[in-house]
Image (cartoon, rainbow, N blue to C red):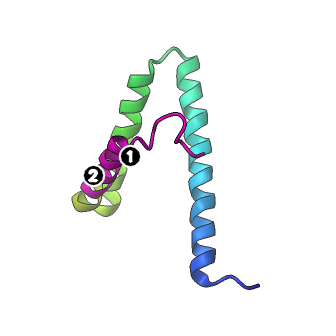
Amino acid sequence: MGHTASDIDALVREEKRLTAVESHSEAWAEGLSAGIEPDIIAEAALETAFCEMLRANGETAALALLDRMREKVIAGAFEPDQIRH
């Protein structure tokens, strides 16, 4: 059974996503252990993400990401029983 280029790209993307989640989880835990409140950590993470998205891909891509995240929040995708890591 062979994998298509699209299958391989999807697997690579998922592996990268999981690595990013792990890195962010470690940074989050470090912030908490340093006494930083979760809302401050979250705001700093979002500011960093949007600055990097703007720098790399421009305003349209950053706003599209913001729209996707807003829709996920509304849909309940970030509720504890819905989160996938």
The extreme right residue here reads 1
Amino acid on which disc 2 is placed: Asp
Residue 18, compared with residue 45, is above or below; it is: below
The residue closer to the viewer here, 65 or 33, is 65
Any mark on residue 67, and which? 2
Instruction: Name the side, left or right, on which 75 lies relative to 23.
Output: left
Q: Does the magenta stretch include residue 75?
A: yes
Give the residue at x 77% y 84%. Answer: 1
Percent coordinates x, y for residue 19 in the rendering? 62, 51
Any mark on residue 49, and which? 1
Residue 9, compared with residue 53, is above or below; it is: below
Percent coordinates x, y for residue 54 in the rendering? 29, 54
Percent coordinates x, y for residue 49 in the rendering? 38, 46
The residue closer to the viewer here, 43 or 81, is 81
C-alpha gap between disc 1 and disc 2? 14 Å
In primary-sequence order, the first of circles 1 and 2 is 1
Magenta stretch in the rendered image: 63-85
Q: How crowded is mark 1: few (under 14 residues within 10 Å), some or many (20 or more)?
A: few
Quadrant including the C terminus: top right
Give the residue at x 55% y 17%. Answer: 34
Q: Is mark 2 on a helix, strand or loop?
A: helix
Give the residue at x 47% y 18%. Answer: 36
